[in-house]
Amino acid sequence: MLQRLPDRHPDENLPEGAVVDGASLGRDVDEAYDFVVIGSGAAGAVAAHTLASAGYSVGILEEGPWVKTRDFGDDVSGAFQQLMRGSGLQVLKGRAYMPMIQGRCVGGSTVINSAIAWRIPEDVVDDWRENFGIGDALTMRDLEPHFSALERDLHVRSVDERVLGENNRLFIEHAQKMGIEATPMRRYDKGCDGTARCLTGCPRAAKQGMSVSYIPWALALGARIFTGCRAERVEIRGGRAVGVLGRAGRHAVRLRARRGVLVAASTVQTPNLLHRSGLRSRALGKHFQAHPGVALGGLMDRRVDMSFGATQGAESIHFRKTDRFKLETIAMPPELAVARIPGVGSELAGRMAQFGEVCVWVVQVRAEAEGTVREGWGGGDSVRFTLTENDIRATRKACGVLARLLFSAGAREVWPGIHGLPHVLRSVDDVKLIDEGPLDPRAYSFVATHLFGAARMGPDPRASVVGLEFATHEAEHLYVVDSSIFPTNLGVNPQHSIMALSRLAATRIASRAVRQAVA
Amino acid sequence: MSPRTLTRMEMAWALDAFEAIFPGPQGIGTMNVREYIQATFARIPLEPVIGLRLAIWIVALAPLFVLRRFRTLHGLTAEEREHVLVALAANPVYAVRQLVLALKAMAALLYAADPAVRARMFAPRAEALPLRKKTSVPPPPPSKEHGRAAKVA
């Protein structure tokens, strides 16, 4: 049975005074907490909840607004404006320009992603231990109880057969027919009814994003969140973080931190915030990595109807280790999918009329390329990132696999979206054109969603920003707990690993604070 | 003048471009495109505003380069407009095709959000679809040469 959801969502009826809306602030703020957490996404929310659970007072700063479940619509343009950084129009700049999607609201990207739960692969942890000096500071054994707790709290489970939808079902069925390992996704799901609206905010709060889970739970334990409040810099005195200076409109928000500041502002914003705060590590802003994605559309021989089913409900990691890519499904809202449908005018209209028969499946590449994060023009964020030839080879092979899979599943047309190739492939024999396709990143339409690095963890202050105890090498009591500390990307969706590392970090920071208090 | 405000000429060109992408009696011309463009330009970051303005100029003046005719998109038939846009979308210059794609994406955000358009997109089609001849598709083997070696900093 699908779970019946409560009439009131968890982001309603919050404790009195627990939410300070920066947009309606009438005065400057100066308050003190044990810990201040910057960011309310996957990392920040979990850290705040863990510290509040340990009995500490916690102040949370969030740059974006709190958009409540009751206000989620299916208007993509409005959702981009309300929920995403730069209205969803940020780009990674390099040889090709690549849209970079980041949430900018309470809950961060967990509000606009598909809630996919993947434990960090063991080979990644081994790689970090052997090649990045992480040693025994971070082991699978350390992470295990945190993954388990998160899975309990957030109702992780495989997509229910009844809400799988045809886009996902066809992928699994035909991948398995072709000998490619494929399964329903495991997601943070408390009663998904297949509205296919994960990307614009779940209208039923079935998706367990941070704005309906750890943030309300932290507030119930006494934490306080300042929304619409941008962290300008961490205040560092005598080599120690003592607070955060933020701004909400015309008003200054100063949150003093008695025991520490935890930065969880995301891979792009964290390094720039640390730089504005005076950190000058040579590794700061370097080693940025991502999982660039490319979507392929298929016009099928049957009704698919992407308006029903889990937004992303099926996946394959068959090629992850050997070829560095993962395959997924995605039910794109029409407003986004139409831009990827070939043609304009009458040709486009003809295909749009058959949109109910369209499948969209995507490639997610574990790119080996590394980029840099800097502050850009006008105080914005600037990321430079160019894929390597190996990355494009992986992309090309993955696109070929997906195209064959689409034809196997009954596609009458496959839309590769690769410059230099026909914009419509009509038979599986045409897929060889993809196999021999261009190795220029500008020929592909990438989108980057999973971001890593740029404030890397490691034992050597010359090569890393954050030490093995999650504190920066340069300032005491200044911790980084988001994916900017990851030495590499993962090859799987990162939210679960980000949360587990953040929970582990916050648990260690809390117990160290107890020891220091006792001493 | 603010870079976020289109001139009357640019707005007319933008309307022509949008109507070339989604033409016809049920096309985007029936929607409030002018208001949508103004609202979008007012709220998105400046860099994309500049890119989209450039895209409007490229599309408007493209007949000069694509058709070798001294006129803007406005003076073309529907078929000629389509031809021009298809040519731009396949242009060998990366920036040109990306900017045109950005303009198409912007138009799609308005057009496909319309309930009537959505209803038409998702309506079951009456006619039976021709079934493709089934083909056996062997899976490609995992590559050996791309096997992940341990990443070194």
Image (tube, coloured by chain):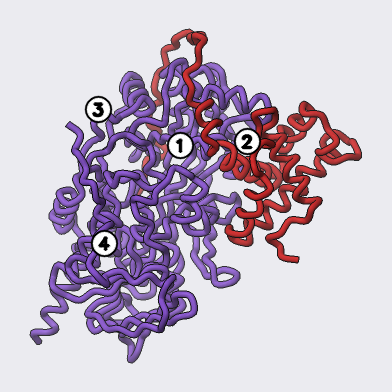
Chain colours: A purple, B red
Horizontal side of residue A382 vs A465, given as left or right: right
Cα distance between the residues tagged 2 and 1? 21 Å
Q: A27 or A491: nearer the eye?
A: A27
Same chain, labels 2 and 3:
yes
Q: Is residue B125 above or below residue B24?
A: above
Amino acid of disc 4:
Ile
Query: Residue at left 64%, top 39%?
Result: B31
SS of the residue under disc 2? loop
The residue carrying mark 1 is A332
Q: Is residue A381 above or below residue A490?
A: below
Horizontal side of residue B137 vs B83, given as left or right: left
SS of the residue under disc 1? loop
Work out which quarter of the rendered image holds the N terminus of chain B and state it: bottom right
Which is nearer the N-term, disc 2 or disc 1?
1
Q: Chain of mark 2?
A: A
The residue carrying mark 2 is A419
Residue A199 percent coordinates (x, y)? 41, 45
Residue A285 percent coordinates (x, y)? 46, 67
Residue A361 percent coordinates (x, y)? 43, 32
Amino acid of disc 3:
Glu
